[in-house]
Image: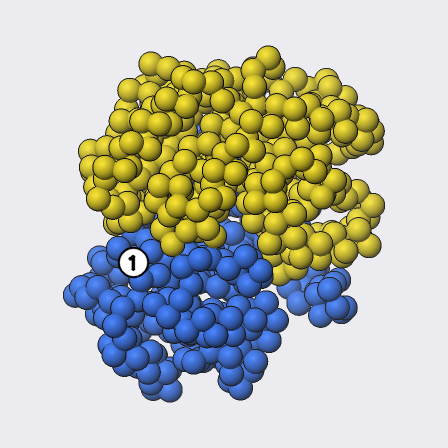
Chain colours: A yellow, B blue
């Protein structure tokens, strides 16, 4: 991680040490950024006793949780730094006395100025993955966790993030051909569901809402592996495509159950098993977190491949950026 | 509400009074039952300072939140009372010392026996709506809230539930013809999205996952009004159908914004505005809660109408009940 980023995260760490208590953590953003933050809520929920919640920014603004106060930590995120709902939510949180941390690619943006502790992340092809949004978020989270409820594992996990660039390159190479084959076979599909669980739910949420619906105009819906058998699975048929992220974490059994059933009744299951990811050199404690980030890298390979086959650039929008709404 | 039900809820109230502290509330179920409980999480989140979370039962079992302990209140629900994941989650919660309350239509079922405080609800055409699952859940919630963080409004809301049967009948009558027209116009649709926010999110979640996907094999996805503009709205087109529940609560602005945009670009928006519901005789404080329940009643009218037009009974399944999975 670059020193500039370490310093920004360090400021948050120092501030937290001097704070009496944080009794709630709110993760607040919109769309893809909200999806990225879902991993944070998951980690707090499963690894700490500090309550945490995820909100789409405008619900946080118009229907503010009653617990928001000076003992709250609010972590928001906007790539452009000018998502109005997220800026408003961050301002509101700061007015309420909460500690506000905002992640953005844009220094000096409205979000950057709204938050007490803005944190920059890099973006683009040539930058290190540990300095991109997820690398920085996890770095921030592991640092915060080590202060709020210290455990040795958080140091181990923090170090593991330095491997992200190499591991991402490996993962891309590993899935390149499969992604291309899948894209050719599925380029005429008008609907592709996504399924996942645990820390990976945010990744399959953004795959449905952002990659497929927003950037490919492919219909989609996001299904939690645990809920698949309680309604959604009735749409499963030989010609219905699904993308399933199969976790190496505690919810693997839920994902396995989906795989065992769905592969019997659909010929179009794409199963991305985190057990196949290049994680041998990653510390045990860090594996589920690194796997969650790499799953996003792998999904992007598949999405870029299908975008190419469909001649539908991931940069095309028909409403976003073209009008006010 | 029937005396038997009042007594069962009364047992929970007595137990709570004698408890030192409840520091977290967990709502745990699967599919449609989980969707019903989402309203409970919403109310705790927005009306109290007690942290609450919703889980699909198997995530709760396989990836248990760290805060689950003897200071937790766990509310689970299963209509049949034999949903294995929900029974297992309730047993686990009880083992951990949590106070366990379970709602079910089936007295003596596995779930009934697993929970320390089982609560029965009625089901069917001829029973009072205040004794059905949602009437009982809200009755339980208002009672619990009045003990944990007392407010006069909870008594008012509790009384308002007695109006449910009359209001449901009125609402059904009011939407009967529109539901039939909508069903005729949309019976050939293969995909219908649902959109909502705030306390109504659970209702649009179950509309997508259970009514459409499970019981009609119509493809669907559930979109939060606050996230619609951050990805999903790019699939909006003249021929894409959506069902939007427009809240009378704090998130109405979010829903209004979806309506204003989507009706410009889709000719197939079904907007169910809670402001049109027969709520004149309902106390102000209770209106958003009664509206949330009535929205479910109204949606059911539309779903039954489209099921009739498609000749696809709501009782038909191809996997559920026919095999082990």
Q: Nearer the viewer, residue A114 or B215?
A: A114
How many marks the image carries: the answer is 1
Q: Residue furthest front?
A: A152
Vertical relation: B323 (above or below) A51: below
The residue positioned 19% from the left and 66% from the top of the image is: B150
Residue depicted at 65% across the width and 47% down the height: A247
Closer to the camera, B317 or A296?
A296
Q: Tag 1, which chain?
A: B
Quarter that holds the C terminus of chain B: bottom right
Q: Residue B191's spot in the image, x, y percent?
A: 64, 43
Give the answer, above or below, for where B156 lies relative to A17.
below
Q: Residues within 10 Å of mark 1 (few under 14, many from 20)?
A: some
The structure residue drawn at horizontal position 59% and vertical position 36%, both measured from the top left corner, is: A290
Residue B280 place in picture, x, y as percent: 26, 58
SS at mark 1 in the image: loop
In the image, residue A311 sits, relative to residue B139, either above or below, namely above
Q: Quadrant of residue A317?
A: top right
Kindly tell me whether residue A236 is visible in this rendering.
yes
Residue A248: x and y, percent? Answer: 65, 47
- Residue A216 located left or right of residue B75: right
- Between B277 and A56, the residue placed more toward the observer is A56
Q: Return the x and y of residue B273 as percentages of the image width and height.
A: 39, 47
Residue with the mark numbered 1: B50
Q: Residue at x 65, y 17 (%)?
A: A313
B140 lies left or right of B37: left
Relative to B306, say whether B191 is above or below: above
Is residue B123 shown to the viewer in this render?
no
Quadrant where the N terminus of chain B lies? bottom left
Q: Is residue B49 left or right of residue A289?
A: left
């Amino acid at each position: 991680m670059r020193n500039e980023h370490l310093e920004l995260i360090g400021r948050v760490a120092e501030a937290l040490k001097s704070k009496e208590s944080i009794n709630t953590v709110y993760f607040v953003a919109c769309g893809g950024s909200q999806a990225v933050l879902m991993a944070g809520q998951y980690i707090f929920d499963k690894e700490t006793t500090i309550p945490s919640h995820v909100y789409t920014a405008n619900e946080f603004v118009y229907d503010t949780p009653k617990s928001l106060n000076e003992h709250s930590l609010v972590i928001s995120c906007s790539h452009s730094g000018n998502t109005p709902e997220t800026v408003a939510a961050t301002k509101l949180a700061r007015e309420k006395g909460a500690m506000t941390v905002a992640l953005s690619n844009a220094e000096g943006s409205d979000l950057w100025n709204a938050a007490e502790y803005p944190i920059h992340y890099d973006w683009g092809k040539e930058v290190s993955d540990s300095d991109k949004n997820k690398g920085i978020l996890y770095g921030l989270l592991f640092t915060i966790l080590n202060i709020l409820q210290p455990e040795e594992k958080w140091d181990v996990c923090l170090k593991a993030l330095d491997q992200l660039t190499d591991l991402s390159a490996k993962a891309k190479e590993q899935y390149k051909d499969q992604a291309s084959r899948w894209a050719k076979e599925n380029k005429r599909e008008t609907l592709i569901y996504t399924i996942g669980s645990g820390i990976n739910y945010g990744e399959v949420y953004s795959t449905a809402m952002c990659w497929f619906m927003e950037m490919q105009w492919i219909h989609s819906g996001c299904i939690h592996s645990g809920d698949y058998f309680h309604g959604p699975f009735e749409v499963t048929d030989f010609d219905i495509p699904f993308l399933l992220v199969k976790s190496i974490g505690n919810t693997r059994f839920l994902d396995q159950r989906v795989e065992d059933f769905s592969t019997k009744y659909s010929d179009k299951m794409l199963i991305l098993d985190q057990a196949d990811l290049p994680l041998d050199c990653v510390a045990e404690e860090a594996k589920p977190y690194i796997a969650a980030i790499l799953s996003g890298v792998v999904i992007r390979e598949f999405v870029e491949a299908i975008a190419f086959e469909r001649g539908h650039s991931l940069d095309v929008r028909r409403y976003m950026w073209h009008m006010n709404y």
